[in-house]
């Protein structure tokens, strides 16, 4: 399954954190963003890596992964109310 992520400010921190994704493909996006396509079957580790990037990353596809990230972000936000 391909996971497509939109990274903002794609710099050394992001490159280093994604170094374990050997089959990942990076493409320049708009406004200094990078699109990263990561083939990944088990989302557990990928979710943790995405959350580590905070608001600097957005999951574009697949919709299921996007929903999982949204649910986790809502749970995190509710802890700070």
Image (cartoon, rainbow, N blue to C red):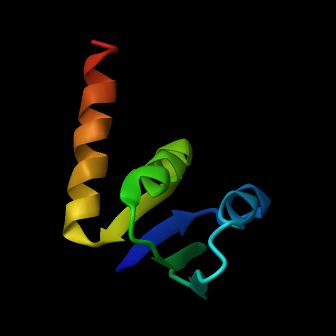
Would residue 78 appear left or right of 35 to someone viewing this image? left
In the depicted view, which residue is nearer to us: 32 or 60?
60
Image height of 15 relative to 50, above or below: below
Q: Quadrant of the N terminus?
A: bottom left
In the depicted view, which residue is nearer to us: 22 or 10?
22
Image height of 18 relative to 26, above or below: above
Q: Quadrant of the C terminus?
A: top left
Q: Residue at x 67, y 60 (%)?
A: 14
Residue at the farthest front position: 42
Q: Position of residue 57 (x, y in %)?
A: 48, 58
Q: Residue at x 21, y 54 (%)?
A: 67
In the depicted view, which residue is nearer to us: 62 or 30?
62
Q: Is residue 31 visible?
A: no
Query: How many marks on residues?
Result: 0
Would residue 6 appear left or right of 79 to someone viewing this image? right
Would residue 30 appear left or right of 76 to someone viewing this image? right
Q: Is residue 58 visible?
A: yes
Q: Position of residue 63 (x, y in %)?
A: 20, 68
Q: Position of residue 21 (x, y in %)?
A: 62, 71
Q: Residue at x 39, y 62 (%)?
A: 42
Q: Quadrant of residue 33?
A: bottom right
Q: Residue at x 72, y 67 (%)?
A: 19
């Amino acid at each position: 399954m391909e996971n497509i992520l939109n990274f903002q400010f794609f710099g050394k921190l992001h490159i280093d954190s994604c170094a374990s994704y050997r089959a990942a493909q990076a493409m320049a996006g708009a406004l200094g963003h990078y699109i990263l396509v990561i083939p990944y079957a088990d989302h557990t580790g990928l979710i943790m890596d995405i959350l580590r990037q905070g608001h600097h990353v957005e999951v574009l596809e697949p919709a299921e992964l996007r929903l999982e990230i949204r649910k986790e972000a809502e749970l995190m936000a509710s802890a700070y109310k």
